Image: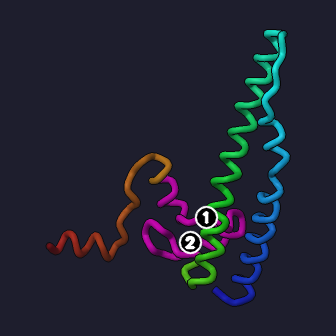
Amino acid sequence: MTKTELNTFRRALERRQTELGSGSRNREALAIGASADELDRIQHSSDLDSAMSALERNSDRMREVRIALHSLETGTFGICAGCEEPINPKRLAVIPWASRCVVCQEAADRGQAPPRGEFETSLTLAA
């Protein structure tokens, strides 16, 4: 990857980090409120669950963004954590914090081990 491409990804990641860092608006929804009305309590409980889910998603995404920024610093950005092959630049353009290629991410989503590369497969078969 060229320096220009890496800088483009760095800027996108830093922008996303800033957006996620301003997520304090979701914390306001976690305020504990009391109401005598049963319907209000149910609504508040539902709002609380939604706010907690949003905070968790933001926290997870922030961690992924920080890991991607760190990988830029260490020179490992764009390398799949599953198969150690380059991640398609089109995927990174859409999801710059992606740590896996599409094939390995799909395997992880299904709870499977990432597929082995051709070289690893040939070594296994030769043994």
Q: In this view, does 111 lie to the left or right of 36?
A: left
Which image quadrant is residue 95 in? Answer: bottom right
Identity of the residue drawn at 84% across and 16% down: 35
Provide the residue span drawn in magenta: 78-106
Label 2 sits on residue? 87
Residue 123 in the image: x percent, y percent?
23, 75
Amino acid carrying mark 1 in the image: Ala
Give yes or no for residue 99 being in the magenta stretch.
yes
The answer to which of 29 and 64 lies nearer the viewer is 29
Q: Is mark 1 on a helix, strand or loop?
A: loop
Where the C terminus falls, by quadrant?
Answer: bottom left
Residue 70 in the image: x percent, y percent?
61, 76
Identity of the residue drawn at 72% across and 83% down: 5
Residue 13 in the image: x percent, y percent?
73, 70
Residue 3 in the image: x percent, y percent?
70, 90
Label 1 sits on residue? 98
